[in-house]
Amino acid sequence: MAEKTMQQLQKEVDTYISQFKEGYFSPLAMLARMTEELGELSREINHFYGEKPKKKTEKARTVEEEMGDVLFVLICFANSLNIDLQEAHDMVMEKFNTRDKDRWTKIEDTEGESTK
C-alpha cells in the first residue's frame, strides 16, 4: 500500500464525510467520540498488556484497529475545525526540539558513547 501524507489522509477523510448530509459532528460531539475511541483503545491495551484478559464472548479486535479509529476521529476533529494536522505536528516537534531538547536522557552523549 502506498504511503500517504497527512494532507492526503485529511483529504481522504473529508471526501468520505462530505458525501453525507450530516457532515462533521460538532466539536463537543467530536470530543465525546474521541473519548469513546480512546476508551476502546485503553480496553484493548489492558487486554494485551494489562491484567484483564478478554472474555471468550468478546470480539477479537486489535490495538492497531483501535488506533486507526482514534486517528480517523482525530482527523475528523481537525477537519471540522480547519486544522492542518501537518502544521500542528510541526509546531509540536519544534516545541520538543527546542523547549524540551534536554529534558530526556539521550542514547548517546556528546562524546558518542552509549549512556545505557
Image (cartoon, helix red, strand yellow):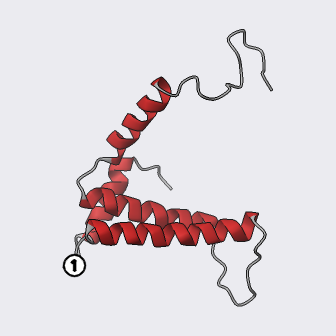
Give the amino acid type for the residue marked by disc 1 in the picture. Glu
Question: Is 99 left, or right, of 48 in this rendering?
Answer: left
Residue 12 picture quarter: bottom left
Residue 25 picture quarter: bottom left
Total count of labels: 1
Vertical relation: 113 (above or below) 84: above
Q: Which residue is mark 1?
A: 22
Q: Residues within 10 Å of mark 1 (few under 14, many from 20)?
A: few
Q: What's the residue at 23%, 74% (across, down)?
A: 19
The quadrant of the picture occupied by the C terminus is top right
Residue 100, position as x, y percentages in the image: 52, 28
Q: What's the residue at 19%, 79% (across, down)?
A: 21
19 or 101, which is in the foreground?
101
Question: Is 30 left, or right, of 67 in this rendering?
Answer: left
Residue 15, position as x, y percentages in the image: 26, 65
Q: What's the residue at 70%, 16% (across, down)?
A: 109
61 or 52, which is in the foreground?
52
Question: Is 38 left, or right, of 82 in this rendering?
Answer: right
Vertical relation: 58 (above or below) 49: below
